[in-house]
Image: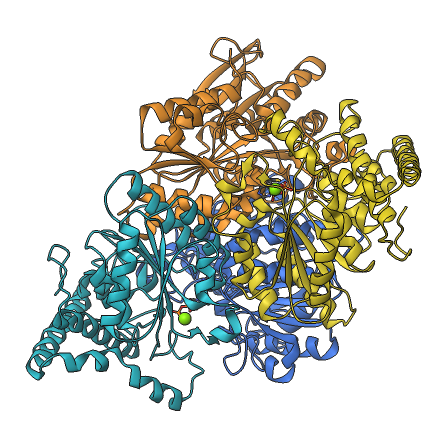
Chain colours: A orange, B blue, C yellow, D cyan
Amino acid sequence: MATVLERLNHALHHAMEMDERVYVLGEDILDPYGGAFKVTRGLSTKFPGRVLPTPISEAAIAGIAAGMALRGLRPVAEVMFGDFVTLIADQLVNHAAKFRWMYNDNVRVPLVVRAPMGGRRGYGPTHSQSLEKMFLGIPGLTVVAPNVLGDPAELLQAAIADEEPVLFVEHKLLYPCQWLEPGHSELQDYSISKMGSERYPAFTVSPVFTTTPHLTLACYGYNYELARQAALELTMEREIFCELVVFSQLSPFALDPLLASLSRTRRLLTVEEGSLSLGWGAELVARSIEAQDGLRVRRVAARDLPIANARSLEDAILPQVGAVVRAAVELTG
Amino acid sequence: MATVLERLNHALHHAMEMDERVYVLGEDILDPYGGAFKVTRGLSTKFPGRVLPTPISEAAIAGIAAGMALRGLRPVAEVMFGDFVTLIADQLVNHAAKFRWMYNDNVRVPLVVRAPMGGRRGYGPTHSQSLEKMFLGIPGLTVVAPNVLGDPAELLQAAIADEEPVLFVEHKLLYPCQWLEPGHSELQDYSISKMGSERYPAFTVSPVFTTTPHLTLACYGYNYELARQAALELTMEREIFCELVVFSQLSPFALDPLLASLSRTRRLLTVEEGSLSLGWGAELVARSIEAQDGLRVRRVAARDLPIANARSLEDAILPQVGAVVRAAVELTG
Amino acid sequence: MVGYNTPRMDDHVSLYRTMLLIRCFEERLLAAFGTGKLVGTTHAYIGQEADAAGVFAAACPGDVVFSNHRCHGHYLAYGGGPYPLAAELMGKSTGLVGGRGGSQHIQWRDFYSNGIQGGIVPVAAGMALAERERQSGKIVLVFIGDGTLGEGALYESLNFAALWKLPLLVVVEDNRYAQTTPVELAVAGTMAGRFAAFGIPVWERDTTDVLEVKAAATEAVAHVRGGAGPASLILHTYRFSAHSKGDDPRSPAELERLRRFDPLAVHAPRLTDAERQQVKAEVTAAIDEAFTRADADPLPALLSNR
Amino acid sequence: MVGYNTPRMDDHVSLYRTMLLIRCFEERLLAAFGTGKLVGTTHAYIGQEADAAGVFAAACPGDVVFSNHRCHGHYLAYGGGPYPLAAELMGKSTGLVGGRGGSQHIQWRDFYSNGIQGGIVPVAAGMALAERERQSGKIVLVFIGDGTLGEGALYESLNFAALWKLPLLVVVEDNRYAQTTPVELAVAGTMAGRFAAFGIPVWERDTTDVLEVKAAATEAVAHVRGGAGPASLILHTYRFSAHSKGDDPRSPAELERLRRFDPLAVHAPRLTDAERQQVKAEVTAAIDEAFTRADADPLPALLSNR
Ligand SMILES: Cc1ncc(C[n+]2csc(CCOP(=O)(O)OP(=O)(O)O)c2C)c(N)n1
Ligand SMILES: Cc1ncc(C[n+]2csc(CCOP(=O)(O)OP(=O)(O)O)c2C)c(N)n1
Ligand SMILES: [Mg+2]
Ligand SMILES: [Mg+2]
């Protein structure tokens, strides 16, 4: 058993060991500190020349990584808090994501930017956001998020091996979670199947006690935890059966696994931690409806407000299990 | 008759005249040049002290405007090309949009950032985008776009009078368009009604020749032109009748006018110039479906690619009237 | 306590009181984290008290301030009371901003802070423009750390401030580290050169003596208030606590050595024993009251979606 | 023509040929806009030819270049051929990047450009890091204008370049205007100070003489290639055409006065009449061929969604 944090850290160690083009850069990543969330721990001791501690300059970090990638290296950059991706928006959107297509496929930009996102730790309005939605649907940019169903190490290694620029979104609360190695699912009575792309798979978690689940719960990253708890509660207390579809690849949107589930359930409930409006769920809903008329849908997400520091307010702003349960009841009612 | 450009320019003149707290800042806005698209023409001659030409520093321009707004002025900042809003993402998202709520409503941030967006002028990948979708659904930020149905001057003045930070999106091709002063609609046989908020109204354009239009075309800004042409073609050549809902306020999403139309048509077709995935249309679709089960929907938008420079490629990437017509036929088929 | 409307006191006792207030507040705060009463994290100002006390002894009460993640000391020296700050840190509805902001995001009268490094500087520059245009006579002070010299927004703002002769004082508190990163790894060239490049005059001091800070700040403030444009004040100092909580790569020996520069110890000999005891009693009482009262206050609730 | 594999020629004739090639290419281009064959806009290099010719006479053929919106001159001096550039500008499938990029977004071998001011500098710094790590012996040259000194990303990058001793040469072409904004309104302090602040050495010349540019560039390039870290080359020059099309606030009198500094006129006397005529004929033929051939090429089509 290993935590997501350990798997991510392992992936970086492994990638640096296997490929000397891999470089890691970011703020405060040197040992013994090893990064604000410790994902880079041990790297600077083992690969001193290829772990580059940077000044506080997010835009340059991203731009430098893009330049490294253009010239044959495989940089993995860390943005200390995902909230600061706003500072690299120009580098991602107008540089890294454009180069390959704009230069007629003459170049590749194999760059990974890792960004710890999410709230529920009382860090307040500028250190708790899930801003990945701003970067979903940006042509040329791949957005990926690990979860406990797939091996986070494999996912990060796949991102590092990707020829396209990847924004790798890590929810802070995911770090201490256990990766559910195959056969160790805490969801008994559910079968888990790997779907979609080999590189960034989705996972369909299906109840074995019914062939006709009532609804599909779509989520990614840490929100699998909310979805899972809600699904258990719905099963136990309401006899509402959920099939879960957990995505690793957020953008470009590749929804085949979801559509397969929806063809069975005809009801879609999306769960995400970012604020509701024009969040990830919106595109899921739009694509699903375009593909299948007559679906019923709901979205659970954060309120359209900044994220407060006080726990009582933060809890009221971010989505909770109860909200998922309520939406599911509504949807099946 | 006046062009959108003239109306916007008029609004700035009027606002500066009426309220000495209004300041205008941006790159190359001094006379005789008067800004890259001439929206600020004449201002520096008339209000020399309150028109501030800036260095090429988009982030600081936005931040300075936010500071001015916090301390009692009413800045209107210009970003020369909307493509550069990536450079002000941090200032908008983590500063201007947060201040009011995060400071417990103690402060106001009456700031307007004007951004000329859009393609079809052969300006290539970094000067043709419609990036407003990145800023839709950002808590605390209002996004507005003028169109020819409402008075662009009134809209800009409303934005300047707004206590919230506003991103004001101007499609470059809209500048030379004529504002359709009431009574001058080129859509004969259509009635136009103002709906939604007083400040940032939406316009419902309904065919008078039928009480049961077949579908609702939702759009904003310059894309009204595509939607209009498509609606005419659909009426003439296919006897498919469209009701158009043209939004001025893009975010926060306020969809009452759309829902009213959809309750009649039950079919939604969204038209936008930004790239498809997680664009404006996605949230429209999601909200509409959440509100009304059983709708049929389609979206027309740019392909998920950068915007090429060559006309032949740009045309293939950006949405065209034909695509709107085809989607409408599909939707009603 | 130093209140907003009280004329600013800058005698030895007042300066000591300000510094001790900050010190005791932060120590109490760090201790409170142990009790589980606080969520999130915080950045203590312990060790840097001479900066805030000295600078605000030179500024005027109504001047505008934009501070950063390490803002408690600035707020207290500016004249803010400990109670609403304590309440904010405990996430109470009576906090400075109703519990919405927490440690890094506070606002009180003309004082503001935000947790995004660097991005506060253009905002402060815009405020300075507004104060000048509104002829308020106020100047704007913005505080950044050595690490924040890495952010591009700073340089964009310095250019504007110099071009437009804005009444802006940029205070750099160089505590030799950004989180765990020593300045040698993060700051090329010289700090003073970063300002000189834009023609902005620099006052630079390597001291933890509040009187020296105050003297330099007085000159810099006078320059800015006189309308001659922006200035910078670079203060080389030390932070004694961890960056936030537990992130401190420095050895106990290094920390021990730093204690020699404790600004309270440097300044204390200028007071009599009686004065020091009196101040200590006042400060302790004020902080006790602040935390006790805040503790009993209600939690905020979300009333409406705006 | 100067080709990629030809040893770089930097005798008087070659320098003249490079500058004339740029001049004639741009004049032909501006004329072509009149015919409706071109979409969008363009930024001509006319007046600044000595910069590109001088700098690339000092660099090595395989060095890496990141250029900006005003990139044609850099590309041609670097050794790129006029035909694929003309085709790109006409939006043809045979263009440098198949018509996708157009005037501001080109790529050829180790040459790149992008139309976002400032943001190219960190990318260039990253390239420099890669070249050093890969021990390619290449250095990276990045070109910016005076106006681009406004962008924060530049300063972030200078800090990195200096801290990490990157083989990066930042060439500032100060043509005294950013679009319509004169440097006095946009650049506070000094240009050299902007680099000195980070400990980056500066070579600065106010000249349109290609030999002087070349001499300074040779020193700066040697510094960078020697592994001593980044350098900057500040070239004060003039642009004779409008910023892009029709955006020129300068008076005819001012433009007339500038003509005295025409780099071609400055350099021409070093050649014989026969040499000049020979070069003129060569260049004219090459450009004729480039535009004629490009004109006949097919338009690109969108084949797949990537
Ligand atoms: C834009 C941004 N990047 C990174 C951080 C995370 N962070 C918070 S404090 C800090 C170190 C700041 O160092 P310095 O400026 O020297 O101030 P100090 O903490 O030493 O007072 C960092 C990296 C941030 N808050 N904002
Ligand atoms: C980030 C960004 N802001 C603004 C522009 C628009 N723009 C294009 S060229 C230019 C002026 C550039 O001036 P300078 O750096 O002096 O270069 P020059 O054009 O004089 O060669 C501007 C403002 C841009 N391309 N990118
Ligand atoms: Mg520090
Ligand atoms: Mg210039």
* Left or right of D304 in this view: D84: left
Q: Is residue B242 visible?
A: no
Q: Nearer the viewer, residue C277 or B82?
A: C277
Q: Nearer the viewer, residue B92 or C4?
A: C4
Q: Measuring 71% from the left and 62% from the top, which residue is drawn there?
A: C219
Q: Measuring 34% from the left and 66% from the top, which residue is drawn there?
A: D70
Image location of residue A216, percent across then percent down: 57, 26
Picture quadrant where residue A45 is located = top left
Image location of residue B31, percent across then percent down: 54, 81
* Left or right of B112 in this view: C71: right
Image region (quadrant) for ligand 4: bottom left
Q: Residue furthest bottom?
A: D253
Compared to C57, does B175 lie above or below? below
Q: Measuring 22% from the left and 64% from the top, which residue is drawn there?
A: D77
Q: Is residue B149 visible?
A: yes
Image location of residue B155, percent across then percent down: 66, 68
Compared to C235, does C255 lie above or below? above
